């Protein structure tokens, strides 16, 4: 997925996530707060954070901002149970107290409260605002915490909440270029004209229209936007209901529902695991070559489309490569085939060839899985069914036929496979699903003719979009 | 409606991408760079308390870690002079650190050199940390007497001797904590 954040932002989030060993859900929550994907009010978490810090300052008798920083940076307060253990026995002080569920702060008639789990998350957010931009704003934020520690009440919290909201808004302006994403989604919404469902050809048509604009987005980039659109489309229903004034009563509890859906969406961002799995395959025996890893990363990058939209997956892989070749060539100002030659898509990999490669990858991964099982389960283990035993024996014998680095060293091989087991299982499963999805597509429509038709479309679109450069 | 929807879609798209981009790298980097908590513990340690040698090493060897450590010091400092204040060559006997004036009175026959710290409206500093090149010295400060903090740089205490020598170098960074 591309765009919407810079390296600094990814590193700031990674630092907090790693330091606190945050769960996937908490990392997703933090990412949402940072990008602003929180409704109805994207500043609400900062308001909560300011109140949580006020309550903490009062309950722990913090003398100054330093004491609050110590609490915020403590990885021993990263989880609800840890926070509860540390604070559940705290005496009520000033306007702050704790009850069985978490800390509270008196604030007018309403009062503010959160749970232990909520407090643990808010402390992760505190670490983020303190340490963002590699600590460039640390002194400023610590100064605000000094003021809060001097007056840890609702008024001090409100003041801090406003400051933090401005602080994060400035951070977003500097590190989260969301405007181009927003423009593209507005265009997609306009293109679909109220529809929620879309087809592979809708993605292609939208991309073709976008290619006549100035920014000439990658087909793959456009497809990534449709992945998000599809994942979020149920959410849009909630937003519409919200916009209709008549339904205010009917929308009782919508805040929680909307927030829950947003949380699911961010945490369920699925390709992460596949990309991480590929990146973390051990270096030992060459279970997958570099080219095989690149292929898998390319093919599975639009998850879940490799299961549900094999045609878009094929298009993105085959013509996406042509387009990134074009973009690279334009950026470098030379190298390799010329623009006019590239736009003709002569180098595009035919879908039939891609399908064969997917099938070969899938078969290879299955073979590696059998070897992994054989290395894990001793052939003389008891209670093995005879057919299982013979499968394992065959897999063990198969090792000798694998002509790859590291397969001739039994110790290294066993260690390498043990480390790769879980990743292999998941990759094999996903590659198999892609292979089946492509086979299903091929039954409806011969891949050769689909490719020929698509090549005409892509070549024409490229030729128009890159006409100036092609003749230059 | 479509503007609000487009904004939310953009935010959620970026959030999903960020969740992926910030995925844990199984501690490969954590092993080489101390985390915020470890650096903060080091920045707030009491003088003479045991130190985490890995953190000390990282501050010495990695300029990024050193920068982050200085940011943590600066954030809690009553006053600091992060880099060379005086352009002069040679030894300096006095310098300004924020609102404070820092002077070293030379030793006499029967008394060691004296560090004198005056000024400052805020709370008096409890600690002084001097950083010069790879070297760091941290010393506790007594409460002020009549507005001045006086520290005898006892020749029998190696840290005190080093502190005196480092503070004389204009390139020495000073944090009053």
Image (cartoon, rainbow, N blue to C red):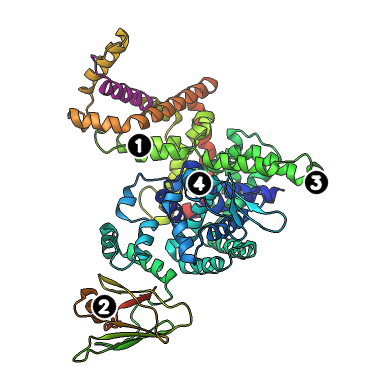
Residue A464, can we see it? Answer: no
Structural crowding at the residue carrying mark 1, measured as other residues with C-alpha within 10 Å and reported as few (<14), some (14–19) or many (≥20):
some
Labels 4 and 3 positioned on one and the same chain: yes
Labels 3 and 1 positioned on one and the same chain: yes
How far apart are labels 4 and 3 at the CA level? 41 Å
Residue wearing tag 2: B163
Q: Which residues are magenta?
A: A361-380
Q: Quadrant of residue B102?
A: bottom left
Q: Quadrant of residue A348?
A: top left
Which is in the foreground here, disc 2 or disc 3? Answer: 2
Residue wearing tag 4: A84
> Which residue is at a point 20% across and 22% down the rendered structure image?
A400
Residue wearing tag 3: A245
Residue A93, can we see it? Answer: yes
Labels 1 and 4 positioned on one and the same chain: yes
Which is in the foreground here, disc 1 or disc 2? Answer: 2
> Which residue is at a point 80% across and 46% down the rendered structure image?
A245
């Amino acid at each position: 997925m591309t765009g919407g954040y810079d390296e600094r932002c990814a590193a700031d989030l990674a630092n907090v996530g790693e330091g606190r060993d945050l769960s996937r859900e908490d990392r997703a929550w933090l990412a949402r707060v940072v990008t602003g994907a929180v409704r109805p009010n994207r500043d609400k978490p900062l308001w909560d954070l300011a109140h949580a810090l006020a309550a903490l300052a009062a309950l722990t008798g913090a003398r100054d901002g330093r004491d609050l920083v110590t609490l915020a940076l403590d990885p021993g307060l990263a989880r609800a149970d840890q926070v509860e253990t540390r604070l559940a026995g705290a005496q009520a002080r000033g306007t702050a107290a704790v009850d069985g569920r978490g800390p509270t702060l008196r604030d007018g008639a309403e009062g503010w409260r959160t749970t232990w789990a909520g407090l643990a998350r808010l402390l992760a957010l505190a670490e983020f605002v303190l340490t963002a931009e590699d600590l460039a704003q640390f002194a400023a934020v610590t100064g605000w915490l000094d003021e809060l520690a001097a007056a840890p009440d609702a008024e001090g919290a409100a003041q801090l909440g406003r400051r933090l909201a401005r602080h994060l808004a400035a951070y977003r302006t500097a590190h989260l270029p969301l405007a181009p994403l927003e423009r593209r989604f507005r265009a997609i919404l306009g293109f679909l004209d109220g529809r929620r469902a879309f087809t592979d050809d809708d993605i292609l048509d939208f991309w073709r229209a976008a290619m006549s604009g100035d920014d000439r987005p990658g087909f793959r980039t456009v497809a990534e936007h449709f992945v998000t659109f599809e994942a979020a489309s149920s959410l849009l229903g909630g937003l519409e209901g919200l916009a209709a004034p008549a339904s205010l009563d009917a929308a009782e509890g919508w805040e929680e529902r909307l927030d829950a859906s947003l949380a699911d969406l961010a945490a369920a961002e699925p390709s992460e695991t596949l990309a991480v799995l590929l990146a973390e395959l051990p270096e030992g025996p060459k279970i997958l070559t570099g080219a095989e890893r690149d292929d898998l990363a390319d093919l599975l990058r639009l998850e879940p489309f490799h299961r549900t939209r094999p045609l878009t997956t094929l298009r993105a892989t085959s013509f996406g490569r042509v387009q990134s070749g074009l973009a690279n060539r334009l950026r470098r100002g030379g190298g390799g085939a010329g623009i006019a030659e590239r736009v003709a898509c002569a180098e595009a990999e035919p879908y039939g060839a891609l399908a064969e490669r997917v099938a070969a990858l899938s078969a290879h991964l299955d073979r590696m899985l059998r070897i992994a099982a054989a290395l894990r389960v001793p052939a003389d283990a008891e209670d093995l069914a005879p057919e299982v035993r013979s499968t394992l024996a065959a897999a063990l014998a198969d090792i000798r036929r694998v002509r790859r680095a590291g397969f001739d060293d039994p110790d290294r091989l066993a260690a390498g496979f043990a480390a790769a087991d879980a990743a292999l299982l998941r990759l094999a499963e996903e590659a198999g699903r892609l292979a089946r999805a492509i086979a299903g597509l091929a039954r409806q429509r011969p891949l050769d003719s689909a490719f020929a038709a698509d090549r005409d479309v892509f070549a024409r679109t490229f030729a128009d979009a890159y006409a100036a450069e092609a003749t230059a | 409606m479509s503007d609000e929807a487009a904004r939310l879609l953009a935010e959620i798209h970026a959030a999903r991408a960020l969740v992926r981009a910030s995925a844990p790298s199984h501690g490969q980097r954590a092993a080489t760079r101390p985390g915020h908590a470890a650096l903060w513990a080091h920045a707030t340690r009491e003088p003479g308390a045991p130190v985490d040698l890995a953190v000390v090493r990282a501050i010495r060897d990695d300029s990024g870690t050193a920068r982050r450590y200085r940011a943590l010091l600066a954030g809690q400092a009553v006053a600091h002079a992060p880099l060379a204040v005086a352009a002069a060559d040679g030894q300096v006997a006095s310098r300004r650190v924020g609102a404070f004036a820092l002077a070293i009175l030379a030793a006499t026959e029967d008394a060691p050199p004296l560090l004198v710290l005056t000024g400052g409206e805020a709370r008096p500093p409890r600690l002084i940390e001097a950083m010069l090149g790879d070297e760091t010295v941290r010393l506790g400060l007594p409460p002020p007497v009549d507005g001045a903090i006086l520290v005898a740089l006892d020749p029998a205490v190696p840290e005190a001797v080093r502190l005196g020598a480092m503070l004389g170098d204009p390139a020495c960074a000073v944090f009053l904590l």
